[in-house]
Amino acid sequence: MTIELYHHGSSVCAAKVRLCLAEKGRDWHGHYIDILKGDQFDPGYLKLNPKALVPTLVHDGRVLTESTVICEYLDEVFPDPPLKPAGPYERAVMRIWTKAVDEDLHSGPVGALTFCASHRYVLRRLPEKALEAFLGGNPDPVKRARKRRWVEQGFDGPDALGAVLAYDKFVGAMETRLAQVPWLAGQTFTLADVGAVPYIVRLDMLAMQGFWRDRPHVAEWFNRINERPSFQPAFYQWIPDDLLDDLASNGANAWPEVEAILAKG
Ligand SMILES: N[C@@H](CCC(=O)N[C@@H](CS)C(=O)NCC(=O)O)C(=O)O
């Protein structure tokens, strides 16, 4: 039984799958796809993942994409410990959260915030030709255009406002929920939490803990997550120190812009 994961240190979707595998106590073999250098556009990788995205899981030679689907799959093939609630209603609630992560945060806000605040500066270190190849590489024309905007315009462009507000709304919904129950789907840690954690870690890495400054239940949930044995292996061990430094320092520089957006609401 071999598990291979094509992933990258700063990919929220890849981190979701690493966290799931760590919770399951499963060993895996990694292929590092540097999505900030354009490895995802390699023709060999495109055969596995035609959308040029990470993660891709290969389990016993069979390929799976889509991080939320991969986590559901892993929970079925490795049911112990379970990461889905026992009851059908609670499982549905869990899926409302994983769907919200995909539709409300991953659809644009996490990329817009990360690129506008930090990745645009990291990418500028690429030689001009490599940067152009990177910006032109995405097979989806809409995503290609928006990434160019994030990189070229940052917070002066049209995307940062919506991204900050969507993130704030999501963290606000978490606060409301976590004031009632210890975990997003109810009484146990589930794929709902696995799905949300990487997006909160992203804010943490961007030194944007201000998103939960006045949200004690999110802060307490995140502290509990940090103490799980799965946390370090899933996140920090995969992020190169220089990228971590870039995220923290660029994120801190961008925080006043984020705060200004939040203040206006
Ligand atoms: N729906 C996909 C989204 C995957 C995705 O957007 N991956 C990002 C990193 S989190 C990526 O590979 N980006 C590379 C690029 O945009 O060029 C999933 O959940 O796996």
Image (spheres, helix red, strand yellow):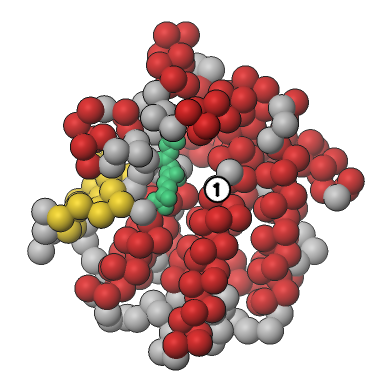
229 and 188: which one is in front?
188
Secondary structure beneath label 1: loop
Q: Which residue is mark 1?
A: 107
Q: Quadrant of ligand 1?
A: top left
Residue furthest out toward the right: 264
Q: Is residue 7 above or below residue 124?
A: below
Q: Residue at x 63, y 84 (%)?
A: 181
Q: Type of residue at label 1? A: Ser
Q: Is residue 132 above or below residue 123?
A: above
At which x and y percent is residue 243? 49, 34
Q: Is residue 105 left or right of residue 253?
A: left
Q: Quadrant of the N terminus?
A: bottom left
Q: Residue at x 44, y 88 (%)?
A: 88
Residue furthest out toward the top: 128
51 and 153: which one is in front?
51
Report if residue 206 is visible in the image. Answer: no
Q: Residue at x 68, y 44 (%)?
A: 163
At which x and y percent is residue 21? 31, 64
**Which image quadrant is residue 85 in?**
bottom left
Q: Is residue 94 left or right of residue 86?
A: right
Q: Residue at x 70, y 37 (%)?
A: 160
53 and 171: which one is in front?
53
Q: Is residue 257 above or below residue 23?
A: above
Crowding at dot 1, Cα within 10 Å, few <14 / some 14-19 / many 20+, comes out as few
Report if residue 89 is visible in the image. Answer: yes
Q: Is residue 80 above or below residue 114?
A: below
At which x and y percent is residue 122? 52, 25
